[in-house]
Image: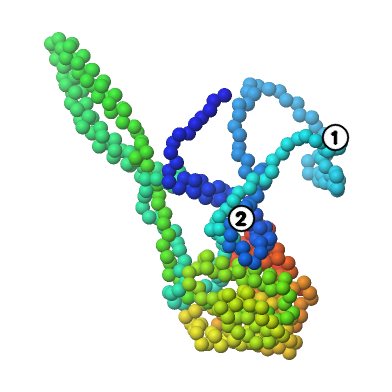
Amino acid sequence: MAHFIDRRLNSKGKSTVNRQRFIRRYKQQIKRAVSDAVGKRSVTDLDHGEEVGIPSKDITEPVFHTGKGGRRSIVHPGNDQFTAGDRINRPPSGGGQGAGSGDASDSGEGQDEFVFSISKDEYLDLLFDDLALPNLLKNQYDKVVQYETYRAGYQTDGVPSNLDIIRSLKGSVARRIAMTGADRKKLARLEEDLQALKDDPHDNTLAIMALEKDIRELKEKIARVPFIDTFDLRFKNYDRRPVPTSKAVMFCLMDVSGSMDQATKDMAKRFYILLYLFLTRTYQNVEVVYIRHHTQAKEVDEQEFFYSQETGGTIVSSALTLMDEIIRDRFDASDWNIYAAQASDGDNWADDSPQCREILASRLLPVTRYFAYIEITDRQHQSLWREYERVAEVYDNFVCKHIQTVSDIYPVFRDLFKKSGHPADAGDSSYASAP
């Protein structure tokens, strides 16, 4: 039994680098675990870290071992039941039935899932991976700041994947020339002297032996200079720099009428907390306007939007009208990218729903980059949904989505804000606009 002990000192941040490499390698498994975990969290802890489980079979490493070797003859048994192309039926399944036979055993072993703890930042990075505000145009370089990664020279420490081989070899050549240049010149002179002594007809045996010894020692000295040393290694360095982008404002409209029970309000708050974390995580200084409404609409701050207990009847057009007034007063459509997300249970005064469609079509959607309507209900859709469906058929920048349970929130959120050209993640559900 041989034991290998690595006594090399870890470079600064080595554990962090290895951690990030692990996350990149098992990104899909971790993203699936994060997607499952977000639906189980409460309204107030969506921005904490998470412990995710990865099946052990997904993190197994290949094993190399010595084969039996030699020439061997093997006879593989055939079968008298199937031929190539036959479809094999599933084995019978049900409670208590498995692949084995007999009763349960009191011995045996297996492997649980590998549990991996991710930090708050890693959790949010995975949560909002490949998401972006749709139709973001460069109206005016201000407010929103995104970052791009760029090459920033070289450094003497890094991960093997960033090693610049050519640059490192150039450094190696330069170091060896600097360290052995004088010795190589001296070696060339000694070899010339040795050749001259050998060509001399006189007996120069002792001098030749002395020169050969000096040449041999000089060659050994030159050979001791390593071909490449850690001092020669150069790693590509990457940094992030801000990229000027456009000004953007997000309007959050939430129905707080009496028909919205506490469970429905909690789901609406979950959606808006996801939206808020996404905006503050991905962009800097995005304006967010909060509007709560029942029969009357009111612009509120973040604290009141999420925690106020005010309630009443339902007139949805009041929120749309207030949004229109705020846009005209503070957000010129020629300078701002305007977005909106509206959440409601769909309950509205019947005569008000056509008015909502008219306000959207004539005032808001012509100046809005993207408007998302989220209906949170397990009942049959009512007049507001039907009117909004008519709007969605005409305007590409208007989307209707339906949420029934907490587990629907994150898939719908990803579907609304996935980057153009990025298909929805495996396992994410895309919900139809029809009931």
Tag on residue 80? 1
Taking 395 as reference, is 115 above or below it? above
Residue displayed at 50% across by 73% down? 286
Q: Quadrant of residue 102?
A: top right
Judge whether residue 255 can be spotted in this image. no
- Graded by Cα atoms within 10 Å as few (under 14), some (14 to 19) or many (20 or more), the crowding at tag 1 reads few
Left or right placement of residue 283 versus residue 404 in this view = left
The type of colouring in the image is: rainbow
Q: Quadrant of the N terminus?
A: top right
Q: Position of residue 375 (x, y in %)?
A: 70, 75
Numbered disc 2: secondary structure: strand
> Where does label 2 land, which residue?
50
Indicate whether 407 appears above or below 360: above
Q: Of the two numbered discs 1 and 2 on the same chain, state the one appearing first in sequence.
A: 2
Can you name the residue that lies furthest to the top here?
203
Residue 356 tag number:
none
Q: Is residue 370 above or below residue 159?
A: below
Question: What x and y, as percent, mark residue 408?
Answer: 70, 65
* Residue drawn at the location 58% of the way across and 62% of the way down: 47
Query: Is residue 224 at all visible to an observer of this figure?
Result: yes
Question: In the image, what residue occupies the spot 60% across and 39% down?
Answer: 61
Q: Amino acid at mark 1?
A: Asp
Q: Residues within 10 Å of mark 2 (few under 14, many from 20)?
A: some
Q: Nearer the viewer, residue 90 or 50?
A: 50
Residue farthest left in this picture: 202
Amino acid carrying label 2: it is Glu
Residue 432, position in %: x, y? 72, 70
Residue drawn 37% across the image and 42% down it: 233
Quadrant assignment, res 78: top right
